[in-house]
Amino acid sequence: MSNMNTVLEKKPIKFKSGFLKELSTNKALFLMILPPFILVFINYYLPMFGAIIAFKNFNYEDGFLKSPWSGLQNFEFLFKTKDAWEITRNTIGYNLAFIVLNLVIAVTVALILNELRSKFLAKFFQSVIFLPYFLSWVVVAYLVYSVLSPNGLYNMSIAPMLNLMPIDWYTAPEYWPFILPVVNIWKNIGYGIVLYLAGITGIDPEYYEAAVLDGANKIQQIKAITIPFLVPLMIVTTLMALGNIFRSDFGLFYQVPMQQGLLQPTTGVLDTYIYNALISSGDLGMSSAAGFYQSVVGFILVLLANWGVGKISEEHKIF
Amino acid sequence: MTTKALESTFESNSISKTSNLIFNILFSIYCIACIAPLVLIFMVSITSEISLIENGYSFFPSEINFSTYKYLFYDPEKILTAYGVTIAVCVIGTILSVLLTMMYAYPISRKSFKYRNFFAFFMFFTMLFQGGLVPWYILYTKYLQMKDNPAMLVIPALITAFNVLIVRTFFSLNLPDSILESAKIDGASEFATFIKIVIPLSKPVIATIGLFSVLAYWNDWYLCLLFINSTKYYNIQFSMYQALRSIEYLTSSQAASMGNASAELMKIPGETLRMAMAILGVGPIVFAYPFFQKYFIKGLTIGAVKG
């Protein structure tokens, strides 16, 4: 009997040494994390389960769970349209352009800013270049509009001055593959510059002192010291951006072309397509299929990118 | 080598005066390109409507007048409401966001917290995989009945993995276990420690994520676009978007040639008005920028380089 008792007693003790024990010793920490945890669960995790609607014929009355399954029908519809190819091409194409341009320009500008003789001027330039980063896309849309609208700076001042033909930019899709990268660089390049300048400042000055004593000139120092030190940061940034190649900045593609239908072929990306299908046409099947396509391919790309980072430098792996 | 010789060697390690000058000129030109569009919309906002129709957008309006602003403040209700919404959202959102972010980051930075890795991964995973816009939107509008609820301008942006990771990194670098242990030995409860020790020691990181949060809420139009119907809950960015859209809406049917553009525009009142509105929306950011940018850069480098 006594043996039996000890066995019975042991069980709850063993259980208690697990989760419940932790709960009672760290009660306060659990209480603290509970509210933000619930918020994260609702805002991020419930929609993950809700992503099953891509395989359903969703209607509002039946909701996520009771709506009838439809197999791959939504995806069939999506990939039958020419939209699917167009938005995938645009999303990847623009992102690739942004990645290359951002990397090359940000690193180059950071290297030059670091060499300017006046540190005051360098700081000043950096601050001014960073300013557009803090403007909302609505403001940027205004600024672009003030330059490109029929009555704007280009058509009324620049074109007449240089004897060029006026252009109705907002009805001419062929120009937007150039306009959007310029606008994106204009707004976001300051961020990259700050990042790489921080990387450069972190390099031990002794390396340069030694190089100078060995008679290395500026270009040689940059090639042999600065760039090799920046390479890990460049790789991590680029790979992470490659992992996000299926996602785009909704504000850039939604606000700046001002939702002009004629511009769709060159400005439509996955994010704007999903938004339009959801809000404007209310086509839940199509938009949830496109959303699922984006999430899953995006997730695989992130995993691949992280694996790639690990191959190059284990310590820079994100997870 | 004498010190003097060394100094002159390092002096010669600067780029030549000529290339320095060239770079300075190039940067100055680019900086003008960064500022000029803002100056342009300001100049348009103080151009008279007639001169705008005759000459288009120009840095040097032939006739300056401030009647647009007078008009704007003659009936300021819309703008004041939008400012009110934006300011309220910024204040409430930032306070809640900082608090919740710290409440998540603190436990996962404590080594004595057994499940810290689970909770850290739970947060971090949201950066890798998202359910997507559609289920997220349906969740809030159908299940939680939050359509047209001003709380939607705050809630979805309250907690982000990026901010939690910044704060956790800060905690693990700046809050040695010894301090927290000694507080415990002195009999302080976990909450007392959090309020009396952790928060005062975290001022730099609170400033950083607070700033991120203020900027995100100030610049937000997306949540308003998705969830808000009533004009009374429009924030400043969304009002600007509406103003730009309606002029756009008025001109988009114009298939007419460029020559007719100005004639078409004659019928549309208040293009200068819209630009004045843009100035009111962007003004506070531009004026506050010199003060906040260095804190922002500091925070960015904590999060990005070490995070």
Image (cartoon, grey):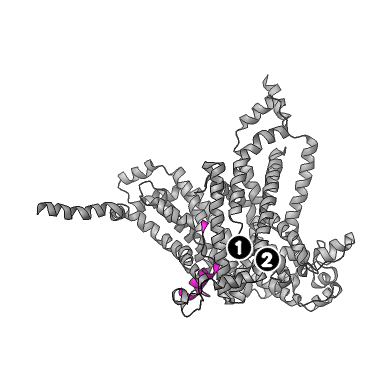
Mark 1: amino acid: Asn
Mark 2: amino acid: Glu
Q: Is residue A179 left or right of residue A76?
A: right
From the top left corner, tell me how far across and down residue A23 is, in percent.
Answer: 31, 55
Quadrant holding the N terminus of chain A:
bottom left
| A242 or B52, nearer to the observer | A242
Please determine whether, in this image, residue B178 is positioned above or below residue A263.
above
State which chain disc 2 sits on.
A
Residue A177 in which image quadrant: bottom right
Q: Secondary structure at mark 2?
A: helix
From the top left corner, tell me how far across and down residue A190 is, in percent.
Answer: 66, 51
Alpha-carbon neighbours of circle 1 within 10 Å: few (<14), some, or many (≥20)? many
From the top left corner, tell me how far across and down residue B17 is, in percent.
Answer: 78, 35
Residue A119 in which image quadrant: top right
- Picture disc at residue A76: none
The residue to which callout 2 is attached is A86
Alpha-carbon neighbours of circle 2 within 10 Å: few (<14), some, or many (≥20)? some
Residue B264 in which image quadrant: bottom right
- Picture disc at residue B219: 1
Q: Check chain identity for marks 2 and 1: say if they share one.
A: no
Q: Is residue A144 left or right of residue B160?
A: right
Give the residue at x 60% y 60%.
A247
Magenta-highlighted residues:
B128-149
Q: Furthest residue to the top?
A: B1
Residue B129 lies within the magenta run = yes
Q: Secondary structure at mark 1?
A: loop
| B249 or A281, nearer to the observer | A281
